[in-house]
Image (cartoon, coloured by chain):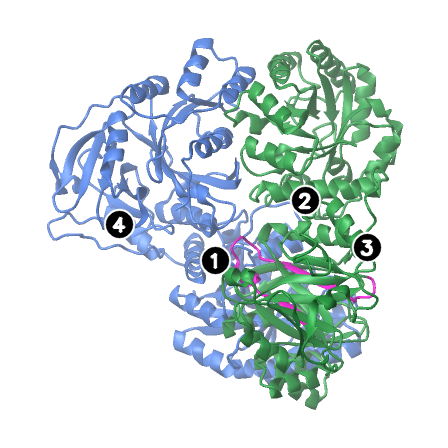
Chain colours: A green, B blue
Amino acid sequence: MRTAIATVCLSGSLTEKLTAAARAGFDGVEIFENDLLASPLTPEEIRARCADLGLTIDLYQPMRDLEALPEDEFARALRRARHKFELMRRLGADTVLVCSSVHPLAVDDDALAAEQLARLAGLAHEHGIRVAYEALAWGRHVSTYDHAWRIVEAADHPALGTCLDSFHILSRGSDPKGIEDIPGEKIFFLQLADAPRLAMDVLQWSRHYRCFPGQGGFDVAGLVRHVLATGYTGPLSLEVFNDVFRQADPGPTAVDGRRSLLVLQEQTGAATPPEPVVPTGIAFAELVTPDPAPLAAVLGALGFTRTARHRGKPVDLWEQGDARILVNTGPAARRDGTRLAAIGLQSPDPAGAARRAEALLAPVLPRRRAPEDAPLDAVAAPDGTELFFCGGRTPRQPDWRADFTDLAPSAPDTGTGRIDHLALTQPWHHFDEAALFHRAVLGLNAQESVDLADPYGLLRSRAVANADGSVRLALTVGAAPGDATVHARHIALACDDVVAAARRFRAAGGRLLPVPANYHDDLAARFDLPEEELAAYRELGILYDRDPDGGEFRHCYTRTTGHVFFELVQRDGGYQGYGAANAPVRLAAQHTAGDLTGG
Amino acid sequence: MRTAIATVCLSGSLTEKLTAAARAGFDGVEIFENDLLASPLTPEEIRARCADLGLTIDLYQPMRDLEALPEDEFARALRRARHKFELMRRLGADTVLVCSSVHPLAVDDDALAAEQLARLAGLAHEHGIRVAYEALAWGRHVSTYDHAWRIVEAADHPALGTCLDSFHILSRGSDPKGIEDIPGEKIFFLQLADAPRLAMDVLQWSRHYRCFPGQGGFDVAGLVRHVLATGYTGPLSLEVFNDVFRQADPGPTAVDGRRSLLVLQEQTGAATPPEPVVPTGIAFAELVTPDPAPLAAVLGALGFTRTARHRGKPVDLWEQGDARILVNTGPAARRDGTRLAAIGLQSPDPAGAARRAEALLAPVLPRRRAPEDAPLDAVAAPDGTELFFCGGRTPRQPDWRADFTDLAPSAPDTGTGRIDHLALTQPWHHFDEAALFHRAVLGLNAQESVDLADPYGLLRSRAVANADGSVRLALTVGAAPGDATVHARHIALACDDVVAAARRFRAAGGRLLPVPANYHDDLAARFDLPEEELAAYRELGILYDRDPDGGEFRHCYTRTTGHVFFELVQRDGGYQGYGAANAPVRLAAQHTAGDLTGG
């Protein structure tokens, strides 16, 4: 099926929007009237620009408040329409959207609405144009898709059809099943948007909080299935009003939108990209650093041993049990300092995983970094993190391991020998995009997003994980662009006994993040914890959480090295979270310690 | 009356919050539990810090989900309470807030709630503590203030009273008149917040969108009058949860909050600051620039004449009719380039206006810049703009004019000889603050705020004006911190005939902002404008708007010099707006022209 995107989804000038849409692989665009009005290009130049970019203009959106009007008002509206049809001829657009009226003089008279829409369609027909009539969720008299369709049916004009919009239909809680009663050839257009489930005024919700399909709470795929069942052959077109998208770089937003349509097409059987290959474990986490000494000290204190060195590159492998961390002192490190830059995902089918990722528009990285290296499939996540798909019979014997020369035997697991999760802070505008990417490309499941109160602003966090929890990624974004808090990322190591692990770390010279005594006083008030246990938590800065089912979470943090720190976590009783309740205290402690600086 | 602020209103560590509250002149604070938990200071150290800063701790906020519980749950809650009362003793806080329960096991049983609250109050009493019970708007069984009061009355314990919160009361639409039925001595605390009128889930509304009294849509002053009528003698305390405040510098936020309470006290008769002195005109606008030549060219083309020079400073006066513009090439210019830095407001009582501003916490600027200068009262607005209060018998003969040596006779009014309005872009987090400042300090009236779609993000704009429209300020803020669009400010000059004025400007070498032809094609479609009029608009880049009552607005823009541009505006038929409908086209045209750059 053809895919399109409304220019209002993207930030920038009309030229920037068209370029971004074409680069992301859309077939067409809806041109939003204000984008055209504000453009210095003539309609003919816009038409030529679209043609050069391989884009069709599938819809023009100038019309509103047209039907069920007093005759003199309708005459004025027809006069406007004539101007717009002439403009569309110059533009080369053949379908116009007409939204149901919010005009104060519009009357509740379906027969009049049908008669006037038929007259409008007659005028449009003379210009070779089709009219697609859509019910706005807040339309004055027409606010549901079935009502709009009844009026179109009554008007009975070949140049008049209906436009369906998933937001307007699903935000009102309408049952989309009835769509199948509409003949496919009378559905002139299909606009798609998702939205988080918010209890708020529908107009505000629509204008500021829409998102791409799969990023919100609506069953957009279910709706599309009903539309496809009618025989609809028009494009799937995104129409999203979102305050964040308005400010974000339009290139990534367009790619994000097209990925959402690819996933939607897969869900509805309209396309069959390569199947997802769900990762089965974390093969490694890769840190880049200009100076390996501080990291080496931390890793050593955590029980890791430097076991091998890459044959061709300045990369060391540190191991402990099943946890593997690469320390890369190559050129990338000099740019951004010490940071978590790449993740190796254990994959039952690395090539298949990479094909899936590529089909869903993840940039593919070169397979071989050097001729002698094992080929390693890799893509870039939206935030720039490199994702390597690692094969091999077992996680302990991956293909990539052969590129390394042994230095020392693999260290025994001293109690922190598994990566529990990786916390990946995201650029400000990439939050919904990141969650969709990890779900769609990697086949991970997303949890609900939560707000975390940092002393200097709210953060939003959302975790994605595979079914058995052997791959868990926590995605966090700041409340506004430029929030320095979110530069630091961390690696959480699973422990059977966090108290013992923290003691060993400290005894080996490691520095733990101090936690205020007030926090532990509060733990004493809230939970009936044994006195000696609480004393150990106080001493080591261990935080505690308990879920409603009695699952328990004990965790503590190391001080930060560059933009990286480590967490030691102990999960008991089926605890599935990440200690979000403790995040404000942890973040404040890191600010106090000076561990969360910009850069 | 005493004033207080909850630490949750302010950004930063507890220490930073306390410092900001004290500097803004608050008498006390409410300490929010998470701020204490996250602080490395012990309760005793916090107590000492507050004492050093002259702050009392008027409320501690740790309690929730306490009443109408099954006995075993209540026993656990009492255990927690005992810990917290002990903490409060260390902290030196004698009142604790208990919010109505949202506990899943809480039952709808007022008698049980009263009995358990009485037991809690008994325990509190042993520690010298009072319990203030408050109805949350989303409480499970108790969600209105009168219901909470009935339970307190039934419990009948001297250490139990009620806490009133303006947000919880007004967001539910409760009638605050009934507050007067509560004995003042049983109102243990009063929390104040305003909020914009949003149709959204009350919990989300409360947690993210509260603002200071006078900044939103609630009649907070009316509520406070009812509370004062009871004989309440406790503090007026601000409790505002706001995503923007969480990120903003706490110093200005605290000042803003205290100003809102001062205005509230005035409105309720609890304080009598000097009366507002409403400005009667714009005496001058002052531009600073490192290089006066480009500005001189623009001003000359606009019909201004350089009429005088300041005796002691590098400041020129340019005049045309009643419009006066100062061009200052002093040291400030070298820092930030060409910008609109100060406004002279014609005032019937400059000293009174300055006293009012100072009483409402505007920083007072030195009255005399040099011994020979006329004394000029001046304050800084929240955005740093200097506001001068100018006296003199008429606007044409102001006091300050005597500091200038004549260079040339005042130019005749060539049709642009009056300042219509000044557009003052605001730092990101100062939007509500700016509107409150201009209303409260200057006695101006605020209009509704509107969203303006810039190609690179939404802007918000709100105008303030005096009754006859002779002083109009348009305040605009970007959608996010760091938005470069909002650096440019502008001066709008009133014209009787904008076409003639624009032609003269262009003939004199001035450069007008080009407006896309598509915009004028749309005007032709929307309005029945005479062909020759439209041709002139196309030629000159004139924009057009019409209000529902037939009022008309014609306006065009000059190109930008540094961070300053000019607008020529023609108002007819009582048009009161600022052409917001045209702002997206204007902003896009400025981006196209490269006129809106950062800096």
Residue A269: x %, y % from top left = 86, 39
Q: Is residue B582 left or right of residue A60?
A: left
Q: What element carries label 2?
A: helix
The answer to whether the residue labelled 4 contacts the one labelled 3, judged by CB atoms less than 8 Å apart, is no
Q: Name the residue carrying label 3.
A: A277
Please tell me the numbered disc located at residue B332: 4
Of B490 and B430, the residue lying toward us: B490
Q: Name the residue carrying label 1.
A: B248
Q: Do labels 4 and 2 share a chain?
A: no
**Occupied quadrant, residue B537:** top left
Please tell me the numbered disc located at residue A256: 2
Q: Is residue B11 left or right of residue A149?
A: left
Q: What element carries label 1?
A: loop
Who comes first in sequence, dot 2 or dot 3? 2
Q: Is mark 3 on a helix, strand or loop?
A: loop
Who comes first in sequence, dot 1 or dot 4? 1
**Occupied quadrant, residue A52:** top right
Q: What residue type is labelled 3?
A: Val
**Occupied quadrant, residue A344:** bottom right
Part of the protein shown in magenta: A467-492
Q: Do labels 1 and 2 share a chain?
A: no
Give the mark toward the camera: 1 or 3: 3
The chain carrying label 1 is B
Say if B450 sits above or below B43 in the image: above
Q: How far apart are marks 2 and 3 (CA)?
A: 20 Å
